[in-house]
Amino acid sequence: MPVYKVNIKWGKEKFSDVECNTDESPLVFKSALYSLSGVVPERMKIMVKGATIGDESWSNIKMLKNNMTMMMMGSASELPPEPVEKAQFIEDMSESEVNQASDYPPGIYNMGNTCYMAATLQCFRTVPELKERLQNSKGRFSRQAVVGSEGISAAITQLFEEMDSTSQPVMPLVMVKMLHMTIPRFAEKGEQGGFQQQDANECWTELMRMLSEFLPGEGSTTSETVRKSFIEQYFGGESATSLKCSEVETEAATESVERWTQLRCHINTEVRYMQLGLTMGLKENIEKTSPTLGRNAVYVKTSLVKRLPSYLTINFIRFFYKEKESINAKILKDVKFPLEYDAYELCSPELKEKLAPGRDQFEDLRQKKIEHELSGKGLENKKLKKGEKQEDEKERKYHPHSFEGDIGSSNSGYYELQAVLTHQGRSSSSGHYVGWIKHKENQWIKCDDDKLSLVTDEEILKLSGGGDWHVAYTLLYGPKRCEVWEEPVGQDQQAKPEEAKME
């Protein structure tokens, strides 16, 4: 069929010489009329000598000719209102504007070799329970600055509050001053008068110690008598140790319990993965005086974890002292670490048994999701209807990740990596420290002092070492949460109550 030039009568308006190509779908013709009138094709009705033009074909239109008049009915859609704020493209934004628009945390200015402190605090800030506990403890702070655990806790609280209230980088004046007053070695200066670089993991350990002294534990638990500190609850683990003399079989082994806030990953020529480095730390030889022999002897110390915290900190032993150069030299070896970690193999038989129910919850969830997908309902639920929104993370329900009666513990041994502290350089007293914090799925934020940038999971895994790039020094794993499974309600299930009412 040929191309015609037709006239369109629409109310009081008339459009002349509109091209109508019957070799194309009628929707193409209607789209052309939409551009002239503003009437969307779905609300458009076109009449030709009593017949209506459909959307798929021209078959019900018997005759068309040039200059013939068609009748169109339908109301035009209102134009969307002009935006109140002018659209701003990311290419035109400053770095701080990008951070604000992307819901990034603010950076922390470097006040002269204070990157070790900034990186540590960015990692701490990823723990919501710690932020909440500091806020709830504000009433215990003195009006005057107090050096020590209270002063450090107050300074961290003030810094976190400032970071929560702005998207701009913050100046940690009070924090740096309080750190230097409380721990003088962090205030050491070099030959040219500037502050010397410090070991970030030492800073991490000292700040944890200060917080442990000031922040009381939560609630009233059966383990309150041995874990009175918030830090001991959420970051503290326990290991059952046995010390046996390897030279005297008859000497009884000494049993004890050790408490810790970090697990150490030992590094040697054999270690290529974090798990092996951690396992090596469970058995080591030490030298001490033997009461049986009356002299120093070699003892074998074995350890098994008997309590896991909600937040597991792992320190890579990357520095060793070189007497010749008088420096803490760095081990650059590549040691792989996972984004999700299972600490089960480090645990004692008793703890493994306790962890079983919590681990079963994850397996049950996995099986239910597989069954749901195989039933075909999974694909249906992935397709959202018009006007529906994806379920928000905050609306999901999760099983408790701690044992009842032991606040801050881990009841499964499953963890997810949420922060990485790295070092770039050849010595712990030089180089540069950076914090890397998880923002959302496959999206991390590199906190390089006041400069922030987005990175992916792949780039985080490249921090395992092997060169002069940023190398993982301390890892912070948070609890892997198990979602409470709720069978999605399909259309057929929704209809059943209505059918019951009709009956």
Image (cartoon, grey):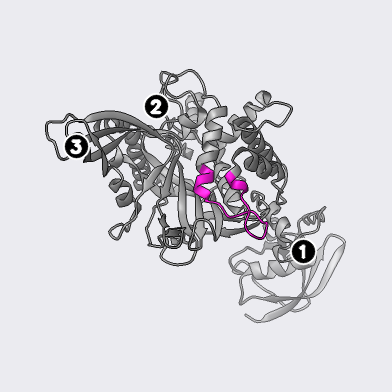
As drawn, the label of residue 245 is: 3
**Image point 69% across, 57% down: which residue?**
98
As drawn, the label of residue 71 is: 1
> Residues under labels 1 and 3: Cα distance?
103 Å
Q: Chief secondary structure of the magenta span?
A: loop
Res 445 → quadrant: bottom right
Q: Nearer the viewer, residue 63 or 395?
A: 395
User: Which residue is farthest front?
Assistant: 294
Q: Hey, what amino acid is under mark 1?
A: Met
Q: Is residue 455 above or below residue 149?
A: below
Residue 326 within the segment the image draws in magenta? no
Q: Which residues are magenta?
A: 185-204
Q: Is residue 65 above or below residue 498?
A: below
As drawn, the label of residue 403 is: 2
Q: Give the percent coordinates (x, y) of residue 333.
A: 38, 62
**Nearer to us: label 2 or label 1:** 2
Q: Where does the N terminus fall, quadrant-wise?
A: bottom right
Q: Give the percent coordinates (x, y) of residue 418.
A: 49, 47
Q: Hey, what amino acid is under mark 2?
A: Phe
Q: SS of the residue at dot 2?
A: loop
Of callouts 2 and 1, the N-terminal one: 1
Q: SS of the residue at dot 3?
A: strand
**Image point 77% across, 63% down: which residue?**
71
Q: Give the percent coordinates (x, y) of residue 184.
A: 60, 42
Dots 3, 2 in contact, CB < 8 A: no
Of callouts 3 and 2, the N-terminal one: 3
> Residues under labels 2 and 1: Cα distance?
74 Å
